Amino acid sequence: MKRPTTIDGGFPARGEAARDRDAARIGRRQFLKRAAQAGALLMAPQVVRGAVVGRDGGVPPSEQILLGAIGIGNRGAYVLSCFLHEPDLRFVAICDVKAVRRQAVKKMADTRYGNSDCATYRDLHDLLARSDIDAVLIATGPNWHATASILAAQAGKDVYCEKPCTKNIAQSVALAEAFRRTGRVFQAGTQRRSLPNFAFAIDLARRGRLGRLQTMHAHPGGLKPGTSGWAPAEAEPSREEVDWDMYLGPAAWRPYNRRWLDGFNFEKGGGMVGGGCLEWGSHCVDLCQWANDADDTAPVEYEPKGDQLHARYANGVRLIMRNDGWLPLGSCPVRFEGDREWVETADNGDIMASSPALLTGKGAKISGYPADFHVRDFLDCVKSRGQPRANADVACQSHIACHAANIALFLGRKLYFDPRKNEFVGDAEANRLRSEALREPWRI
């Protein structure tokens, strides 16, 4: 018997009316069948990976902070590693003027996540234009810190910026104003604000356990600021390999020389290589500001005295910046002296005091100035929209104190400063050093 011919769908080839009736009947049956299957699917238990809903240590995508980074060298790579350990953080993009660094950081991120998703950029504007990025880590050379931070705030990004965050007093004021105006979160990389030994010593000073606070001592890391100058010109690499113009950014132009590409030692504070009081000062002076409840102000007097810099606050508390004479407690030491007791601590995590009773309850020792606690404080504030420990206003004032000290050192004389106006009293030469011109086309 001959097999009937068929059309699409397997219907026997019959008359037009029969085909229409069969198609309609099959269509209704298929619809009812599929509706029943869909209902069963909706009623059945749904299996969702625990990581998606936050179980098993996973964080749902809606709760993750997307991070980009600008300028990642040795220090930046360490801080980025602290970010990568956080479960609610996703690192998605790197911008660097050096191709070798872009690729190294991309490899670091892609290895961490098991994919190849990390995007690379040479121009920070391209990274900041991404609407999906919530926050950026800025670890360029100090010539870029303030300008990049302000550009990021204007682009709607929260910012974690390595220190020193500014090069002069004017930049410090502009940074604080930018983050107040935009409502973005800023954390200076002065991570000792988040370490327990420093916090414990500062708490003794603030709660009056030392008596009336009289003198604070800070290690500046250097008290001989000098101009950055030029290195001998070398053959400039291709722009893709090293974008020298972008590397200089707002800093004064100079011929290419690979020694500047370290970044960390490039133009700290008003064109100064060593940065004078900015080296450790942006850490140690910052801690003294906190101990004196002076996060909203700066010292009113600055005077070079031999190999030290002496400053005084309006409340009479003295600040001495010195390199020598410290107890063997490691780098970045601070000391607080009241009219009854004293306390000193530094990076090895130990605390020494005039009386053992002062150290009761000091907690476990943590040494090596890790950034993990500081990074966590920043991420928590990105979510809560609160103020981090080293926010833009705090960083503004501690940096102003360092810049003013640098100017006194550079001029070699005693200066009087008005923290309300952010200017020196009766000294035009010192006031001219509060700012510097930025190279075209950069503005803040």
Image (spheres, rainbow, N blue to C red):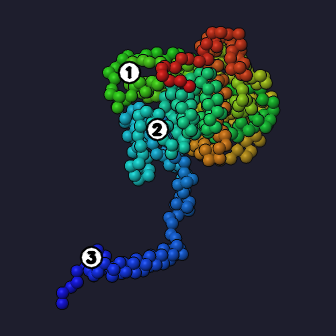
What residue would you read off at disc 2?
A: 127
Which percent across, then down, holds residue 346?
Answer: 63, 35
On the image, the x and y values in percent for residue 83 come to 53, 45
Q: How many marks?
A: 3
Does the image show residue 365? no
Q: Residue at x 56, y 23 (%)?
A: 167
| Amino acid type, mark 2 | Leu
Q: Position of residue 296 (x, y in %)?
A: 72, 29
- For residue 25, the mark is none
Which residue is identified by label 1? 256
Amino acid type at mark 3: Ile
Q: Does 318 sit above or below residue 25?
A: above
Q: Nearer the viewer, mark 1 or mark 3?
A: 3
Crowdedness of circle 1 by 10 Å Cα count: few (<14), some, many (20+)?
A: many
Q: Is residue 327 left or right of residue 36?
A: right
Is tag 2's residue or tag 1's residue first in the polypeptide sequence? 2
* Quarter placement of the C terminus: top right
The residue to which callout 3 is attached is 7
The residue sitting at the bottom extreme is 1
